[in-house]
Amino acid sequence: MLQKSQEKHTKGYVHIYTGNGKGKTTAAIGLALRAVGAGMKVCIIQFLKEKASSEFKPLSKLGEAITCHNYGKEHLIKDNVTSEDKALARKGLEAAKRAIMSGTYDVVILDEAILTNYFHLLTVDDLLTLIQQKPESVELILTGRKADPRFIETADLVTEMKEIKHYYTRGVLDRKGIES
């Protein structure tokens, strides 16, 4: 009989990484690397970001084990959301549906998907429908601040990153290789 740590991946769960603290995307990337190390295939779909941050660059060297896509523009402003922003989010949602239903990926990460609701790009129901339609074998990870309580209720695992102290409050901007 296999020990729990040696069991084959057969059931996929829904993870939420949320909160105002740093590390949500980084945690999801860490899980992606662990999955690839175990022979799984991973798809990462980033919402709200036009280009991948530095943590995504080495992932492209993993070949077909990991696929990354971006759907967004830089510097989205909540009170100035455009039709182009909404169209990009919709394209990202469709790409997520295809990835989840394709049978190709063991793990699908929807980075910043939760925040699309806050920006009125996608609805909570859009994402909940996606979660409900996910095949049982797919591990689904959603990241982003401001998680609606319905996401928390639906997920199997929820981690809240809580900011205790951040040098950003002292005027330190994103540093390449650390925050970007």
Image (tube, rainbow, N blue to C red):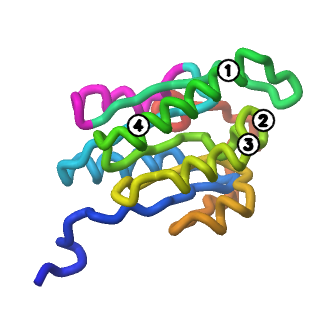
Q: Which residue is mark 3?
A: 123
Q: Residues within 10 Å of mark 2 (few under 14, many from 20)?
A: some
Q: Is residue 95 left or right of residue 127?
A: left
Which numbered disc, 3 or 4, marks the residue that appears first in the sequence?
Answer: 4
Earlier sequence position, callout 3 versus callout 1:
1
- Under mark 4, the amino acid is Ala
Answer with mark 2 or mark 1, whichever residue precedes in sequence.
1
Judging by the rendered image, the residue that carries numbered circle 2 is 119
Q: Secondary structure at mark 2?
A: loop
Label the magenta part by its dominant secondary structure: helix
Label 2 to label 1, Cα distance in Å? Answer: 13 Å
Name the residue rendered at 85%, 22% in the picture.
80
Q: Which residues are magenta?
A: 51-65
Q: Secondary structure at mark 3?
A: loop
Specify the farthest residue to the right.
Answer: 79
User: Mark 1 falls on what kind of element?
Assistant: helix
Q: Is residue 30 left or right of residue 1?
A: right
Mark-to-mark CA distance, 1 and 4: 18 Å
Marks 4/2: CA–CA distance: 23 Å
Residues 152 and 137: in front is 137
Q: Is residue 72 left or right of residue 133?
A: right
* Quarter residue 10 falls in: bottom left
The residue wearing badge 1 is 87
The span from disc 3 to disc 2 (Cα, nearest Å) is 9 Å
Name the residue that disc number 4 marks: 99
Question: Mark 3 and mark 1: span between their CA atoms?
Answer: 13 Å
